[in-house]
Image (spheres, rainbow, N blue to C red):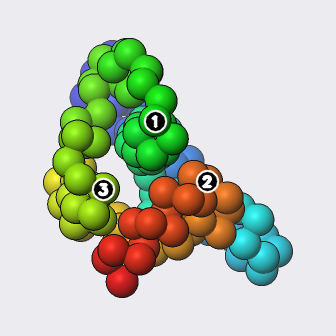
């Protein structure tokens, strides 16, 4: 394959990706204006990957288990080969600030922890955890 062909292929792929992004934005506008899928909508609007969304869900799952006094092997709190590094041994009163730091570290400002928690809570994703964290950071 020569350079000209690679450039052509790249431009075709770029055009296809741009069209998919455009079509996805239109589909988002077509979603009903309810909160049934608020977390999924947040994932779409912030352009999170499957792995990034899984990291969010795993940290909430880890906190939920700790709140309910359940212990699971650390393997449960991994995404791929990456462990969830959120420290649930801290007092729960500190989790809000630590969650904000953790999300900012993971996403470099791409994700707003407050909006993320509100979206999760609206969709019913670890609602008790989200309520507690929101009370601490609002």
Q: Which residue is drawn at 29% across and 34% down?
A: 84
Label whose residue precedes the other's in the sequence (1 or 3)? 1
Q: Rounded to the nearest whole Å, what is the CA distance between mark 1 and mark 3?
A: 12 Å
Of the numbered discs 1 and 2, the one sitting upstream in the chain is: 1
Left or right side of 88 for 132: right
> Based on the displayed image, in which of its 4 quarters is residue 28 positioned?
bottom right
For label 2, the residue is 125
Quarter of the picture holding the N terminus: top left
**Residue 129, above or below 73:** below
How far apart marks 1 and 2 lie (CA) works out to 18 Å
**Residue assigned mark 1:** 69
User: Does label 3 or label 2 sit earlier along the sequence?
Assistant: 3
Numbered disc total: 3
Disc 2 on helix, strand or loop?
loop
- Looking at the image, the residue that sits furthest to the front is 69
User: What residue sits 17% from the left and 54% below the top?
Assistant: 105
Residue on which the image places disc 3: 92
Frontmost of labels 3 and 2 is 3
Query: How dense is the environment of label 1, judged by Cα within 10 Å: few (below 14), some, or many (20 and up)?
Result: few
Residue 98 appears in the figure: yes
Q: Nearer the viewer, residue 103 or 18?
A: 103
The quadrant holding residue 123 is bottom right
Q: Where is residue 104 in the image (x, y as percent from the top left)?
A: 22, 61
Left or right of 44 in this view: 14: left
User: Could you say which disc has been placed on residue 26 in the image?
Assistant: none
Residue appearing at x 59%, y 59% in the figure:
127
Describe the element under mark 1 as helix, strand or loop. loop
Q: Where, quadrant-wise, is the C terminus in this rendering?
A: bottom left
For residue 52, above or below residue 135: above
Picture coordinates of residue 16 (x, y %)? 55, 48
């Amino acid at each position: 394959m020569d350079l000209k062909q690679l450039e052509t292929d790249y431009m075709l792929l770029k055009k296809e990706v741009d069209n998919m992004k455009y079509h996805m934005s239109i589909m988002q506008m077509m979603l009903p204006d309810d909160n049934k899928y608020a977390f999924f909508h947040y994932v779409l609007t912030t352009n999170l990957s499957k792995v990034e969304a899984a990291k969010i869900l795993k940290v909430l799952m880890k906190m939920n288990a700790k709140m309910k006094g359940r212990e699971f092997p650390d393997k449960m709190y991994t995404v791929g080969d990456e462990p969830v590094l959120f420290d649930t041994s801290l007092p729960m009163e500190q989790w809000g600030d630590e969650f904000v730091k953790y999300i900012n570290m993971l996403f470099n400002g791409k994700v707003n922890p407050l909006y993320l928690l509100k979206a999760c809570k609206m969709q019913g994703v670890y609602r008790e955890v989200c309520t507690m964290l929101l009370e601490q950071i609002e």
